[in-house]
């Protein structure tokens, strides 16, 4: 009888522990979301190379960028410590950037094609996630003529030599502070059988620096084979522009105390008129009150 008396409480206790464990596991899994990573390769002006990763997740049916995610970047598909390029953390927009260091030069030269991997280690919120990208090594070459003709050649590394590439879509623009401005009405160009495109510069009234220089940029974006790469060249095709400081002059957008005289007269006149009306009304109210007394 004593054994039966202990058996039932033990079974109840075991059942409660099992239910609590299942509930805890279910709650933990319910809060976990799938982390989605994308990885891109960028080569700026055939000099600076970097990787860009984007992290996002789906919450309530909508994709949201994930910040504060630590990512490890590797060269080649082997995610070993020897191939580690570095680590970066995603910003508020879910982006993480990493410059490819000179130490990776030996691995980079092993093949005409190269793979990169971004890895996120598992956490309480997300499982381990990887993203990879494979690119063929390519570059752009810009040539200009006196009649403002622009020729851009796309080249791919084959064995040990650079050969022209046909069918590469690219843009030709002028670098500006607010973004790149196309050199003409044509938005994109596609290289021909010789790997070249021709563009005409039609921004004749564009302001340049003090010497009239502009910076041309030819770029390939989101190419499945080559990734993102660009080339730049400075040309004297702009209007000479000298920056004149108006810091101590009276202008409409000047600093405090340097607004135009006419604007100050207008503002102060309005203030005086408003206060004058208020003071007059207060005086009249006091007279009415005195008459009523």
Image (cartoon, rainbow, N blue to C red):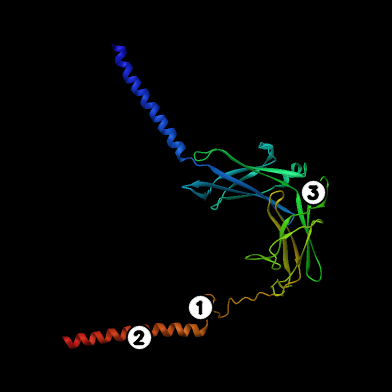
Q: Secondary structure at mark 3?
A: strand
The residue to which callout 2 is attached is 276
Looking at the image, is 112 positioned above or below residue 205? above
Whole-percent x, y for residue 142 in the image: 78, 61
Q: Position of residue 68 (x, y in %)?
A: 53, 47
Q: How far apart are the two marked residues, 1 and 2, measured between alpha carbons?
A: 24 Å
Judge the density around disc 2: few (<14), some (14-19), many (≥20) Cα neighbours within 10 Å: few
Instruction: Determine whether, in the image, residue 63 is placed left or right of residue 52.
Output: left
Q: Residue at x 21, y 87 (%)?
A: 288
Q: Please state if 35 lies on the left or on the right of 184 as rendered.
A: left
Residue drawn at the location 52% of the way across and 49% of the way down: 63
The C terminus lies in quadrant = bottom left
Residue 157, numbered label: 3
Alpha carbons under labels 2 and 3: distance apart = 81 Å
Residue assigned mark 1: 257
- In which quarter of the view is residue 111 placed? top right
Q: Which badge, 2 or 3, is on the more N-terminal residue?
A: 3
């Amino acid at each position: 009888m004593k054994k039966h008396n202990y058996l039932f409480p033990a079974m109840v206790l075991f059942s409660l522990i099992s239910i609590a464990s299942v509930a805890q596991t279910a709650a933990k899994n319910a809060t976990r979301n799938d982390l989605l990573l994308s990885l891109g390769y960028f080569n700026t002006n055939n000099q600076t190379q970097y990787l860009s990763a984007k992290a996002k997740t789906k919450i309530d049916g909508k994709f949201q960028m994930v910040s504060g995610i630590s990512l490890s970047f590797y060269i080649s598909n082997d995610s070993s410590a020897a191939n580690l390029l570095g680590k970066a953390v995603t910003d508020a927009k879910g982006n993480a950037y990493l410059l490819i260091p000179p130490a990776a030069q030996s691995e980079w030269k092993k093949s005409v094609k190269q793979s990169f991997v971004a890895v996120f280690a598992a956490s309480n919120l997300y499982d381990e996630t990887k993203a990879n990208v494979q690119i063929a090594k390519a570059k752009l070459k810009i040539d200009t003529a006196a009649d403002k003709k622009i020729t851009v050649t796309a080249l791919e590394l084959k064995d040990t030599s650079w050969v022209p590439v046909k069918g590469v879509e690219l843009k030709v623009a002028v670098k500006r502070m607010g973004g790149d401005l196309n050199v003409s009405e044509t938005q994109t160009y596609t290289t021909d059988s010789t790997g070249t495109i021709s563009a005409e510069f039609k921004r004749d009234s564009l302001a340049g620096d003090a010497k009239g220089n502009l910076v041309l940029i030819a770029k390939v974006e989101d190419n499945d084979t080559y990734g993102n790469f660009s080339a730049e060249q400075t040309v004297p095709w702009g209007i000479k522009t000298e920056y004149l400081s108006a810091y101590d002059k009276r202008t409409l957008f000047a600093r405090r105390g340097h607004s135009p005289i006419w604007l100050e007269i207008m503002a102060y006149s309005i203030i005086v008129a408003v206060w004058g009306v208020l003071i007059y009304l207060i005086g009249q109210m006091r007279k009415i009150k005195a008459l009523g007394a």
